[in-house]
Image (tube, helix red, strand yellow):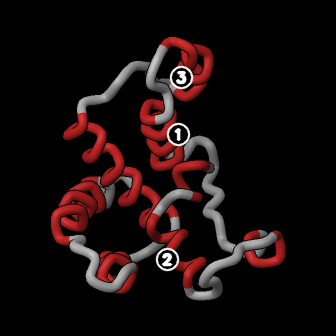
Amino acid sequence: MVAILCSIPRDWYARRFVETHVDHFVFKPLPIPRPPRSDGRWQRTAAVAGRLASPDQRFTTWTKATGGEHGSVPEDEKQDMVAELEALAARLYGLTELQFVHVFETFHERWNYDTRLKAVRRHFHAWASRS
């Protein structure tokens, strides 16, 4: 759930309705994908989010539940995992490639998104055959 709530597709959608203040009445109707727990995209999202949120052994129980492990993640690997989460969120929301590219292009004015979008696209394509 945290991975989806922190994703660019969900944030982009929320920004269509909110500029500065989010309350219960705004937050509750925001769409959240709810795939079956057997969905490989859901399972991978939980594992990657759990790994990124588990920097040390205090999170051992949680990472076992998500099928991951704990410990620090090298920065390049971390950025790749974040890109995969963005691609998974786009897939879980049912976005086409053109739609999620539009999300990146219109997310922030003067945002240099090219490198990140390229990484997300790579994962988006990789998950096409597994969706």
Q: Quadrant of the C terminus?
A: bottom left
Viewer-proximal residue among 40 and 98: 98
**Circle 1: element type:** helix
Q: Quadrant of residue 116?
A: bottom left
Which corner quadrant of the image does residue 28 belong to? Answer: bottom right
The reply to whether discs 2 and 1 touch (Cβ–Cβ < 8 Å) is: no
Count numbered badges in the picture.
3
Give 86 or 111, whichever is nearer the viewer. 111
**Please, which residue is most extreme toward the front here?**
20
Q: Earlier in the sequence, mark 2 or mark 1?
A: 2
Which residue is found at the position 75% from the left and 77% from the top?
Answer: 26
Tell me which residue sits at (52%, 50%) in the image: 3
Give the residue type that dot 2 points to. Answer: Trp
Q: Which residue is mark 3?
A: 63
In the rendered image, which residue does mark 1 sit on? 46
Question: In this orientation, which residue lies closer to the viewer: 92 or 119?
Answer: 119
Spatial separation of the CA atoms under disc 1 and disc 3: 10 Å
Pointer 1 or 3: first along the chain: 1
Circle on res. 96: none
Name the kind of residue labelled 1 in the image: Ala
Q: Amino acid at mark 3?
A: Thr
User: Is residue 26 placed above or below 119 in the rendered structure?
Assistant: below
Q: Nearer the viewer, mark 2 or mark 1?
A: 2
Depth check, front residue: 107 or 35: 107
Using the numbered discs, state the Cα–Cα distance from disc 2 to disc 1 in whole angstroms.
21 Å
* Disc 2/disc 3 C-alpha distance (Å): 29 Å
- Residue 16's spot in the image, x, y percent? 57, 87
What residue sits right under mark 2 in the picture?
12
Q: Secondary structure at mark 2?
A: helix
